[in-house]
Structure formats: C-alpha cells, structure tokens
C-alpha cells in the first residue's frame, strides 16, 4: 500500500481508548461535543506542564526558561505557562497585553522584533518590560521616548551574530538579516548606549529555530557564549540578561527523531561556569516557543464528504489551510510533506486506505494530507492534525474566503 507509514513518533504522545484519541483525559468524540463545533484547536495543559518539567530536569538549574509567545499566544495557554516559566517574550503590543494580564512581572517580559512603532515602544517603556533593540535608530528612538515619558527604559541589544544555527528550519542570525545589530557594530553601539539614559540589561543572541540536531545546537551555544564574552567588557553596565535563544526542534515528519535534550543540557552545564565567572550578575535565558507547545496541541476538523475521483479518494473537511497553513505545506516547506494526520475516532482502524484530506477552499493548495495511509473514514468522522500546538491558528490566513474561524480550547 502506498502512502506515508502511520507509525510516527508524533502519534504516541496522546493515549488512545477504544481507538479514539484522548486529549486532556477526554475522548475526542466527547470533546468535540463539548466544544459544539468543528473545526477547533485543542491544547493539553498536562502535556505543556510535562514539557516544561522535561526542560527543568534536563537543563542546568541556573538556566532561566522563557516562553516565546509567538508560537501560541492563546491567553489561556500563556496564563498557564506564566506559572511555569521564568519569563515571557513577545513580538507585538497585542502579545504584550496578553503577557501583562498574567502574573509574570513586567521586568521578566521582553519585546523583540524589527520595525517597532513609536506607539509600541511607548507602551512597552511605560509597562517596564525589556526592549530587545534591533537597530541603532531604534535605540535612539527609545531614549527619546523614555525622556518624553519620564521613564528610564529597560533595554537589551539583539545581536546578529556572524554565525548561524546549522540545519535550522529558520535561520535568524548570520549573514545579512533584518534581525538585530551586526556583531561587528556592537562595540560602537555599546559606547553610544552608555551616553544615553537607558537601563542596559544585556544581550539577546538568537541564531535559528526548529533544529533536531543536538550537535548543531551545541555548536551554536558555544559560539553564542564566546561572542557574549567578547562583548561584555565593552558593556556600559553589568550584564544582567544573556538570552541565548532557543532553536530546539520537534519532529513533524516520518523519519525525524526527537531532540536529545539531555545532551544540550550537559553542554550548557559545562559552559555556564565561564559565563558566571565573567558575568556574575547575568541570568542566562533559553527562549523557547515551539518546543514547549507544539506537541501538546491538535487541530480537529470534520469530514463533510467522501469523494472518489479517477481512482483516488478525497476526504473533504470543514477545515483547511485557512486554519492551519503549516499543515498545508505553505508555511516554509520547499517540498511538501505530510504532518502526522489521523482519523481521531478511528486512530488505528482495522480497515485502512490511502487518501487525501482536503478543505472547502477553492484552491488546490488546500491540502491537509496528500496520499496518506489512515483508517478508512466516512462522513462525520474527525480528522486530527497532530503537532499543532505551535504556529497554527495565528500563523494562518483565517480571513481567506471568509469561512468561520475555529475555536481554541485548553483542556
């Protein structure tokens, strides 16, 4: 039989009862009745808590763990994580408002991203969060706004390193980038910063994301620490925050293996004493988004029609790329590969077939699974896209063709 094998690391994280997926101790069919509609996203708070515990156990005790909200800014998810992590990282004023509604202290919230507007900067300065500065122009604007507001802004410099995270799904550093200030310009920027009324907190060095190769992450951490030690003597004040980014990946596709987080933790344990010696006041921060929430979430849609066309079966659903752009293959994939997709109320199913799962949109791009083996399904059965806790709803064009938006729940 053709099609990707259903045996996949991502299909083992949720229990199965009577061939039905169980999320947050609730069978999927009952959960769908509770939600009252499809499509919807569901996030398992227990799985999120387990992932944070895994990180705490594997990483050195002195590491500060921050959650990058862009991965999943659902307020209930952020509220839950605020009680588990040491800080929140936002990329917009909208995310900042969600973060400030939690119990997380303002000084433990940071704001990164190029092109921050005067309004966004004013809101952040007034709130007292840490601004990761992306350019010299932004630094001068922050100083000007701080003087106008009568508030001394908390700032860190985002550094664009001269290296990248090898084998990263997205490279955020190395070479010409819109992110951060080029490493070779940082000494002059630090000299200028010392003449401004800014509260210097430290450095943010983020080289890439979605990496499953521990050797690449180890190399990036070593180079990041080395770069920070080269810059510390030029800083106008003691470094209190050293954010070394994240980059920890999760497996999405057949053949991919989960990241060995223990190896990463052991390497950081070896590197930290040198950091503490030269930056005794610095909190070393690992900033993660996808790694914390991706595997704790699913996307659920309902089969509207089972259609045969020239020897192929199409399961037409009420969901699609407008809700889950990443699963459609249109969010960074060069060659489309299937996310792990199952029939949620018939996970294993004795009768199996190769089908394509598509949505209701008038575009051939609206594909959730292309020629994938799964249990034989009928109308009203529930299609589940796994690994959907990160970069799902908010990374998708929900207004495309004006179909109803899905709900999100935390269970």
Image (cartoon, helix red, strand yellow):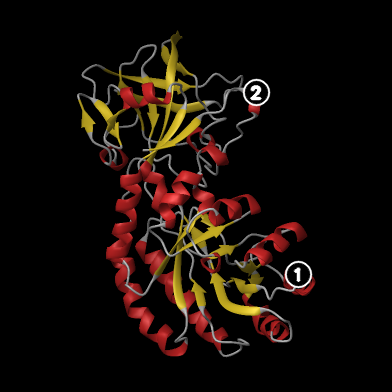
Snapshot quadrant of residue 284? bottom left
Residue under the image location 55 percent in, 65 percent down: 106
- Image coords of residue 43 (percent x, y): 39, 40
Is residue 260 something one can see in this rendering? no
Q: Which mark is residue 401?
A: 2
| Secondary element at image label 2 | helix
Judging depth in this view, the residue of 217 and 137 nearest the camera is 137
| Secondary element at image label 1 | helix
Residue under the image location 34 percent in, 57 percent down: 52
Judging depth in this view, the residue of 316 and 281 nearest the camera is 281
N-terminal of the pair, mark 1 or mark 2, is: 1
Residue under the image location 66 percent in, 62 percent down: 124
**What is the crowding at mark 1: few (fewer than 14 residues within 10 Å), some, or many (at least 20)?**
few
Q: Is residue 60 left or right of residue 153?
A: left
Judging depth in this view, the residue of 393 and 201 nearest the camera is 201
Quarter of the rendering occupied by the N terminus: top left
- Vertical placement of residue 110 versus 27, above or below: below
Snapshot quadrant of residue 182? bottom right
- Image coords of residue 12 (percent x, y): 25, 39
Q: Is residue 377 left or right of residue 97?
A: left
- Image coords of residue 244 (percent x, y): 48, 70
Q: Which mark is residue 149?
A: 1
Quarter of the rendering occupied by the C terminus: top left
**Front tag of 1 and 2:** 1
Q: CA distance from mark 1 to mark 2?
A: 43 Å
Snapshot quadrant of residue 220? bottom left
- Image coords of residue 232 (percent x, y): 55, 86
- Vertical placement of residue 296 versus 149, above or below: above
Residue under the image location 47 percent in, 58 percent down: 103
């Amino acid at each position: 039989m053709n099609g990707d094998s259903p045996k996949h690391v991502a299909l083992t994280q949720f229990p199965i009862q009577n061939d039905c997926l169980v999320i947050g101790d609730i069978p999927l069919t009952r959960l769908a009745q509770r939600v009252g509609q499809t499509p919807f996203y569901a996030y398992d708070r227990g799985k999120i808590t387990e992932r944070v515990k895994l990180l705490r156990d594997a990483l050195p005790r002195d590491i500060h763990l921050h959650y990058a909200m862009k991965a999943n800014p659902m307020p209930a998810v952020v509220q839950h994580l605020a009680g588990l992590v040491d800080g929140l990282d936002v990329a917009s004023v909208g995310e900042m408002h969600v973060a400030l509604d939690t119990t997380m202290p303002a000084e433990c919230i940071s704001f990164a991203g190029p092109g921050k507007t005067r309004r966004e900067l004013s809101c952040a300065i007034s709130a007292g969060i840490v601004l990761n500065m992306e350019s010299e122009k932004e630094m001068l604007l922050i100083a000007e706004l701080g003087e106008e507001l009568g508030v001394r802004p908390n700032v860190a410099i985002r550094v664009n390193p001269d290296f990248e995270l090898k084998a990263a799904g997205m490279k955020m550093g190395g070479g010409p980038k819109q992110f951060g200030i080029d490493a070779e310009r940082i000494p002059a920027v630090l000299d200028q910063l010392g003449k401004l009324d800014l509260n210097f907190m430290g450095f943010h060095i983020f080289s890439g994301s979605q990496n499953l190769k521990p050797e690449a992450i180890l190399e990036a951490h070593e180079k990041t620490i080395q770069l920070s030690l080269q810059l510390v003597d030029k800083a106008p004040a003691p470094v209190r925050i050293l954010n070394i980014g994240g980059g920890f990946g999760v497996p999405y596709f057949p053949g991919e293996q989960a990241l060995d987080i223990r190896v990463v933790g052991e390497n950081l344990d070896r590197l930290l004493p040198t950091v503490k010696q030269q930056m005794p006041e610095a909190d070393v921060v690992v900033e993660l988004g996808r790694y914390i929430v991706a595997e704790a979430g699913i996307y659920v849609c309902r089969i509207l029609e089972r259609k045969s066309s020239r020897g192929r079966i199409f399961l037409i659903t009420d969901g699609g790329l407008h809700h889950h752009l990443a699963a459609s293959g249109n969010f960074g994939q060069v060659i489309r590969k299937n996310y792990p997709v199952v029939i949620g109320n018939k996970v294993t199913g004795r009768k199996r077939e190769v089908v394509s799962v598509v949505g209701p949109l008038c575009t051939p791009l609206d594909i959730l699974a292309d020629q994938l083996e799964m249990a034989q399904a009928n109308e009203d059965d529930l299609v589940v896209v796994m690994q959907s806790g990160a970069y799902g709803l908010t990374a998708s064009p929900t207004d495309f063709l004006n179909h109803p938006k899905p709900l999100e729940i935390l269970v």
